[in-house]
Image: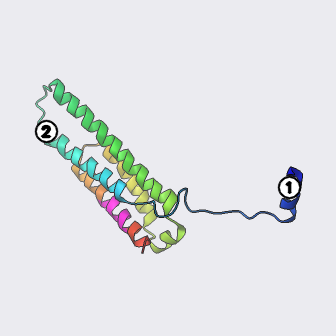
Amino acid sequence: MKKILRLLDKINKPKTAYAHCDVPCGVYEPDSMKWAAETVLKLNEKLLDKEWDGKKTLDERNFLIRAIKVKEEYAQICKEQILILWTDYFKPEHLAKHPELHDLVWKATKQCSTVKRTVSIEEAKKLQEMVAKIGKIFLDTKK
């Protein structure tokens, strides 16, 4: 049977199947990257709102460590969500319509790394702006 199938493949070569994503269409959304960026901003605000007198209590140290850990986790979630849209959803026709998309995604993923290693409201807001632009482009492609 195997030999017959191989012979048929040589006579009538199978065509390559192409798909633009790993899962059914319509599953993608920009909300996850938006709430992740919002979480990063809120944690930066909480970290910068605290008054540290240099003599941290154990509870204060615990808060500091946990807040930084969660901030970094959500920056990574944001990066992953951006990359999912980039690698699985956006297609060449989206880039043709929005030529700034490639550079925007590249800069936004780099910004996720920046907000991981800093405690800065300004940097977190930059990330939010980039994510909002990507989300707007995403929604435009759904029209």
Left or right placement of residue 88 versus residue 41 in this view = right
Q: Closest to the observer: 51 or 30?
A: 30
Place of residue 126 in the rendered image (x, y in percent of width and height, measured from the top left): 29, 56
SS at mark 2 in the image: loop
Place of residue 34 in the rendered image (x, y in percent of width and height, measured from the top left): 32, 56
Place of residue 9 in the rendered image (x, y in percent of width and height, measured from the top left): 83, 60
Q: Residues within 10 Å of mark 2 (few under 14, many from 20)?
A: few
Q: Which residue is mark 1?
A: 6
Place of residue 41 in the rendered image (x, y in percent of width and height, measured from the top left): 24, 50
Q: Which residue is mark 2?
A: 50
Asked if residue 127 is positioned above or below residue 74 in the image, the reply reads: below
SS at mark 1 in the image: helix
Within the magenta stretch, is there residue 24? no
Image point (35%, 41%), residue name: 73
Compute the Cα span from label 2 to label 1. 70 Å
Rendering quarter of residue 32: bottom left
Image point (21%, 33%), residue name: 63
Mark 2 or mark 1, earlier in chain: 1
Image point (52%, 72%), residue name: 93
Image point (43%, 62%), residue name: 103
- Span of residues in magenta: 129-136
Left or right placement of residue 63 versus residue 87 in this view = left
Q: Residue furthest front?
A: 1
Within the magenta stretch, is there residue 132? yes
Rendering quarter of residue 135: bottom left
Q: Mark 1 belongs to which amino acid?
A: Arg
Q: Which is closer to the viewer, label 2 or label 1?
A: 1
Q: Is residue 120 visible?
A: yes
Give residue 58's mark.
none
Asked if residue 42 is positioned above or below residue 53 in the image, the reply reads: below
Asked if residue 5 is positioned above or below residue 133 in the image, the reply reads: above
Q: Mark 2 belongs to which amino acid?
A: Lys
